[in-house]
Amino acid sequence: MAKRRGTPARRPKGKKRPSKGGGLLRLLGWAGLGLAAGALLARRGERQAPAGGQGGEAPARRMGAEASPGKKQPTARPAETQDLDLPAAAESAWIPGPSGSLRLAELHASAPMAVVFVHGLGGSLDHWGALLSKFGPGLRGVALDLPGHGESDGVSFTVPDLAAAIGAVVDALSLRRFVLVGHSLGAAAAIEYAAGNGPRVAGLFLVDPNGDQTQLPARERRGVLEAMAEDAHGELEWAYRQFLTDAPADVTARVLRQLRETPADVLRGCLDAAFDYSPIPRLAAYEGPVRSLVSPLNDLPYSLHRLRPDLPYRELRGTGHWLMMERPAEVFSDLADFLDAARPRFLT
């Protein structure tokens, strides 16, 4: 299958970016898609161009007591970078999806506990490579390219459409029960799937999840859609660079490369759909265990754990939005602990 690539439009040097209703950065930050820092939000009218080991049997280990709602734990940032590639043992395949073929990758297909990974806007299943490398033979790892992303086809990008892609993958692999892990926009898709398929989802693990875009002023949403219509890649790349300021160079390069390779109509369609989706009632419809791991940027009025104060979460300090690429060992430790808690649901 030929891989479709988008070509980002270039803004002439020296040309200032317009501030439309606070701009894309403000909206992404308050909505949870990009999770901008408070200092950047304060500069809403000053948008300047930026300067150029294996785990054991599943679960790997327990980290101790359950995370309590609102509890934050400091974490030191490692100096070294990570291997971001998928494990050599992972096998890729394509399966029929709701609107074309869907690409997936699978590791340890015979393992008893399955974990399904869903990436965010402008990403691909490769975003989970460093985390999947931590899986031992007792864990079955499955990651998919959402519709229109990576090497998957797609023509419609509502959150239910994205959730239907998850359903197509788990049905094709005959997964009876699994833990669902979603990052950013992928977390919204995971919540939507779990709300309608609760008995199959042994647990929801949300990595820097989207907040509730429906609570944003309509004027700001219109302004962002206008900016995206003009230059979707340029607008998102400018915003993403703010969230990658302290990220390792290889993480930055991969995130931006895959963003540029995602067609502009896909980016616009997903962002538009996210504006119309509220995760709160759908999360309430899921009765299984949920845990969230967030970056320091994700601490805003419309963040999921602010709207759901009972949601257990932990803040992983010293990292940007792509936690699983920057700090895979620590994300895996939290996930392993969550798998311990979800184990009883695998046995029912």
Image (spheres, rainbow, N blue to C red):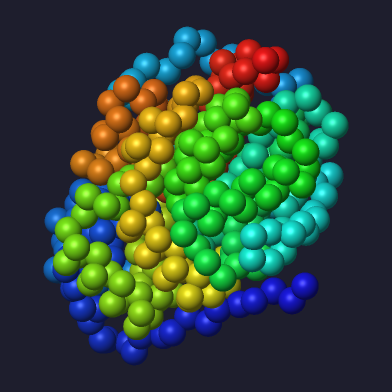
Single out the residue that lies furthest toward the top. 65
- Give residue 153's quadrant in the image: bottom right
Residue 163: x, y in percent? 55, 49
Please give the name of the residue rendered at 48% of the width and 36% of the height, measured from the top-left corner: 195
Image coords of residue 235 (percent x, y): 36, 72
204 sits to left or right of 98: left
Q: Residue furthest front?
A: 196
Please identify the quadrant where the N terminus is shown.
bottom right
- In the image, is 301 to the left or to the right of 291? left
Q: How many marks?
A: 0
**Closest to the observer, 40 or 293:** 293
On the rendered structure, is 86 left or right of 223? right
Write down the quadrant of residue 149 in the picture: bottom right
- The vertical placement of 5 against 31, above or below, is below
Q: Which image quadrant: the C terminus?
A: top right
**Residue at the limit of the structure toward the bottom, as seen here:** 12
| Residue 332 seen in render | no
Q: Residue at x 47, y 80 (%)?
A: 8
Q: Nearer the viewer, residue 154 or 111?
A: 154
Front residue of 166/227: it is 166
Let me know if residue 188 appears in the view: yes
Residue 233 percent location from the top left of the image: 44, 75
The residue at 55%/78% (across/down) is 6
Residue 311 position in % (x across, y down)? 36, 26
Front-most of residues 59 and 193: 193
Measured along the vertical axis of the image, is residue 260 above or below residue 320? Answer: below
